[in-house]
Image (tube, helix red, strand yellow):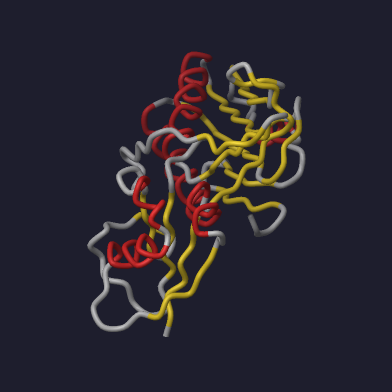
Amino acid sequence: MQARILFFGRLKDVVGCAEDGLPIEGSMDVRAVWEHYARRYPELRQFAASVMVARNQEFADWTELVQPGDEIAFLPPVSGGSGSAYAEVSTEDGSFFALTRGPIDLAQIRRRVRTDSDGAVVVFEGVVRNQSGGRATRFLEYEAYEPLALKVLVRLGRWLRSRYPITRLAVVHRLGRVEIGEAAVVIIASAAHRAAAFQAVQEAIERIKHAVPIWKKEYFADGEVWTEGQWDLRGLEG
């Protein structure tokens, strides 16, 4: 039997596909799987120090043994595909976290987050701009390891609620092509007092850029590039 091997971001460009099947024979760990593809695609080796790995939609260690039927995903540093047009996970407190391939309805999200006990609703709307680093931007494209991205967003929400006295939190992130002027991500927090809502929203966007497996590709008039940062999974590994 085979394991399902997934590649995202720049790794997908290197191997020329987003998914492959690899026969699993004997004792084979995650690092051995990586080495199998690095021998076929030597360019992968330059990313080895910064890549994270997931096994069956959870972050994993490189020494974990791979079983037939496992799903192994290699994840380059996040920046901040396929699947359904809209996927959402809600939590018991009324917070919710979603990935969408359509425009984000900010007003509808705000209505779901606000309660009558709140004295503050803070909104962050990350919008695609027409330039980056002095280069004219045509549009952006986002992809995600969707099952794990939603799990990490839920963990992030619970982590933020443990740190700040907020009532509800919503995070909705675009996938696919996003045009200039469109919102790529919306984060809304409600709270009795404004300080907690402001702090939660500010920390949420910073953690999303470094912990959630969502990748951004920028398309310029003279080329294209994946935007990558640095992993930071503190408190969110699961």
Residue 61 sits above or below residue 224 on the image? below
From the viewer's perspective, tell me whether residue 125 is left or right of residue 72: right
Left or right placement of residue 51 versus residue 4 in this view? left
Q: Answer left or right for 225 relative to 203.
A: right
Residue 159 location in percent, x, y?
Answer: 39, 37
Q: Nearer the viewer, residue 146 or 160?
A: 146
The quadrant where residue 126 appears: top right
What residue sits 27% from the left and 57% below the top?
Answer: 61
Give the percent coordinates (x, y) of residue 168: 55, 33
Residue sitting at 53 percent across and 43 percent down?
214
The residue lying toward the viewer, choosing from 20 and 95, is 20
The quarter of the picture where residue 221 lies is top right
- The residue lying toward the viewer, choosing from 4 and 48, is 48
What residue is at 37 percent from the left and 55 percent from the top?
A: 53
The location of residue 76, given as percent across then percent down, is: 43, 46
The foreground one among 174 and 6 is 6
Q: Quadrant of residue 41?
A: bottom left
